[in-house]
Amino acid sequence: MEPGLIWLLAGVALLGAEMLLPGFYLLWVGVAAIGTGLLLLVTSLGFGAAVAAFLTFLAAGIGMSVEARRRRGPAMRLNAPEAGLAGRMATVIAVEGSALRVRVGDSDWPARVPRGAAVPEVGAAVRVDGVDGMVLVVVPG
């Protein structure tokens, strides 16, 4: 079997394994192997040159991925004020002592009021003042 076909088959197998395993660990290795296989099908490189081409393709893929991630900026945290929950209006749907459950849009969230604030009744409109982990801090709206 030709070395180029072996590289291609290895690359396809790695991409198949990537679909079964979470993360991007095998993606760039598989793409680099396919690139090396295609290069070997059109040229007659030796084993050392093929390995060097593979490593070059691998480094380029990882470098492009890192650069794209850097340009995208930091990932927005879920349930953080910058995620768009702070300032939104909610409706109280359950009250158990000082613990609340509120509905914001189509989602239900655990909530609490700031220390010293009165606990609203079920059905009351409240405004999300902040986020404390997974709990919304709400004030009467």
Image (spheres, rainbow, N blue to C red):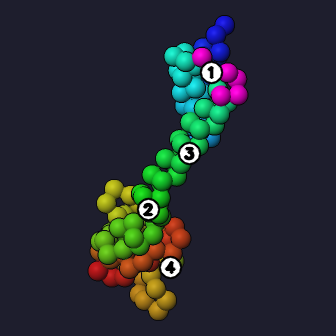
Name the residue tied to disc 4: 98
Check disc 1 and give the amino acid type.
Leu
User: Residue under circle 3?
Assistant: 62
Q: Nearer the viewer, mark 2 or mark 4?
A: 2
Given this view, does label 4 or label 3 mark the residue nearer the observer? 3
Q: In the rendered structure, are the residues bearing label 1 and label 3 in contact, judged by CB atoms less than 8 Å apart?
A: no
Which circle's residue, 4 or 3, is located before the other in the chain?
3
Q: CA distance from mark 1 to mark 4?
A: 72 Å
Q: Which mark is residue 73?
A: 2
Tell me the magenta residue range: 44-49
Secondary structure category for the residue under label 2:
loop
Q: Quarter holding the N terminus?
A: top right
* Mark 4 and mark 3: Cα distance apart in space: 50 Å
Whole-percent x, y for residue 74 in the image: 47, 63
Give me the C-alpha separation between circle 2 and circle 1: 40 Å
Instruction: Tell me the kind of residue under disc 3.
Output: Ile
Q: Quadrant of residue 24?
A: top right
What residue do we see at 31% from left, 60% from top? 105
Locate residue 122 relative to residue 134 in the image: left or right: left
Is residue 126 visible to the viewer in this orientation of the structure? no
